[in-house]
Amino acid sequence: MHVVHSPLHARHAGGVELHRGQLVPSFESPDRIDHILRALQAANAPIGLPRDYPIESLHTVHDPAFVAFLRTAYARWQEEGRSGSMLPSGFPARSLRRDRVPEGVNGAMGYYAFDAGTPIVEGTWEAAFASARCALTAAHLVAEGERAAYALCRPPGHHAAGSVYGGYCYLNNAALAAQALRGAGFARVAVLDIDYHHGNGTQDIFYARGDVFFASLHGTPETEYPYFLGYADERGEGAGEGATLNLPLPRGTAWAAYAQALDVALRAIDRFGADALVVSLGVDTFEDDPISSFALGTAHFVEMGARIAALRRPTVLAQEGGYAVEAIGANVAGVLAAFA
Ligand code: OKP
Ligand code: ZN
């Protein structure tokens, strides 16, 4: 199976986040990719660079003004004499205005972000755009007839909505891939999000659409990030009524309960009649993940991949989370094994 990877991911480095009362290096680190690459090289997967795409290809799911903000944010920050990680300190929460973007970069940052844990550093834009190109390339490989393709995306994407970034995500790679598959002629596309965290951005982008089904298994937002989306009663709206399926699970969920929920999601995707599938592949459901609380072992990722592959749909897999770096390579390779 084709692997699409860009070394430009490493431009997004050195960011910090607030964690349990301390500013710490971001858990979403460049060495995650080194570990995944090593495991895929050992499995003899063909690894290629992404194709070139114009910035406008991002506007299929993202607001152009939002894309322009991401592209220029760090230069604006530097013009104000600052360095280090750009993190917002004020948000348009309830009681505040959301109908205008403040002129200054600090206000604009709070307007477009939904958390203070998603740093923009000097190379963030370059890495995020390259990550999006990996997803678009994988989608086009599948549209050209590959049974499956894996986009080694970093930074991840599923928390980013049309004009909002957060959760280590800037551009929504999985949504871009799903939309590219639609554009290539697949009439009905399903997104299966198996990252530990709810893919709020992907859900939001497709919420009112009946042509893209979104199914997600995740730690319940009652206690887990991103807290404010991903409940079972969110089922889509308008033409998208019934085309969103959330399966929130409690902390500590182990394979037996997880596998049952996975089968519910897979049956729903089958019933939807998907012509193609995008998998938001987070492996932070692993038992030793430092920021997540499910209890899956490395062998379970092999079984997970086998069940997803059994859907027999042309499939794009886009990397999302996974922060136990020592195990991330084996866990990702485990899911991909059934597609090889
Ligand atoms: C991104 B993905 C940790 C706070 C939580 C957000 C987690 C984003 C997960 N200090 N930060 O879905 O794996
Ligand atoms: Zn996650």
Image (tube, rainbow, N blue to C red):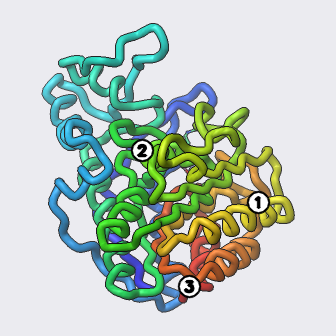
Q: Earlier in the sequence, mark 3 or mark 2?
A: 2
Q: Earlier in the sequence, mark 1 or mark 2?
A: 2
Q: Height in image: 141 above or below 202?
A: below
Q: Is mark 2 within 8 Å of ligand 1?
A: no
Element type at mark 1: helix
Farthest-out residue, bottom:
44
Q: Amino acid at mark 3?
A: Phe
Q: Whole-Å distance between the Cαs marked 3 and 1?
A: 21 Å
Task: Evaluate if marks 1 and 2 touch, with contact meaning CB atoms under 8 Å apart.
Answer: no
The answer to whether 335 appears left or right of 279 in the picture is right
Q: Amino acid at mark 1?
A: Ala
Residue at x 41%, y 69% (from the top left corner): 187
Image quadrant occupied by the C terminus: bottom right
Residue at x 27%, y 24% (from the top left corner): 108
Residue at x 22%, y 58% (from the top left corner): 57
Q: Earlier in the sequence, mark 3 or mark 1?
A: 1
Farthest-out residue, front:
239
Task: Evaluate if marks 3 and 2 touch, with contact meaning CB atoms under 8 Å apart.
Answer: no
Element type at mark 3: loop
Mark seen at residue 160: 2
Dot 3 corresponds to which residue?
Answer: 339
Residue at x 62%, y 40% (from the top left corner): 234
Q: Whole-Å distance between the Cαs marked 3 and 2?
A: 27 Å
